[in-house]
Amino acid sequence: MQTQNSNTAHSLYALYETLPNETQQQFLQELLQKQSDKVETLALFLACQEAKDENEFLTTDETKAFIDSLPQ
């Protein structure tokens, strides 16, 4: 099932790439307007995964500064 989902995702992206630039921009705008929480969560997950894979972890001070910067 994972392979089928991956193939479907790839096919949808290939379709997106064939769209004119203006349509791509409108699609991205609507996607962000309607799914911003999911997009932001996925972006954070991917960034964390990349950091983990590259053994690039925050120091204790960097971690505290990041946590302190989050909205309450």
Image (tube, rainbow, N blue to C red):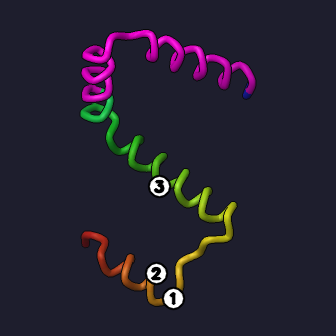
Q: Which residue is mark 3?
A: 44
Q: Is residue 60 above or below residue 66?
A: below
Vertical side of 66 occupied by 54: above or below: above
Determine the CA span between mark 2 and mark 1. Answer: 5 Å
Q: Tell which of 54 and 69 is nearer to you.
A: 54
> Which residue shows up at 49% across the image and 11% down it?
15
Amino acid type, mark 2: Thr
Left or right: residue 63 compared with residue 23:
right
Residue 69 is left or right of residue 64, and the answer is: left
The front one of 28 and 1 is 28
Circles 2 and 3, Cβ within 8 Å, touching? The answer is no
**Mark positioned earlier in the residue sequence (3 or 1):** 3
Is 10 displayed left or right of 15 in the figure? right
In which quadrant is the N terminus drawn?
A: top right
The quadrant where residue 66 appears: bottom left
Q: Is residue 57 above or below residue 22?
A: below
Q: What percent of the width, then of the height, locates residue 53?
A: 69, 61
| 61 left or right of 24 in image | right
Bounds of the magenta segment: 3-30
Element class at badge 3:
helix
Image location (x, y in percent) of residue 62: 44, 83
Q: CA distance from mark 3 to mark 1?
A: 19 Å
Q: Which residue is mark 1?
A: 60
Sequence order check, earlier mark of 2 and 3: 3
Question: Which mark identifies residue 63?
Answer: 2
Contact flag, marks 2 and 1 (Cβ < 8 Å): yes
Q: At x 32% / y 81%, what residue is drawn?
A: 68
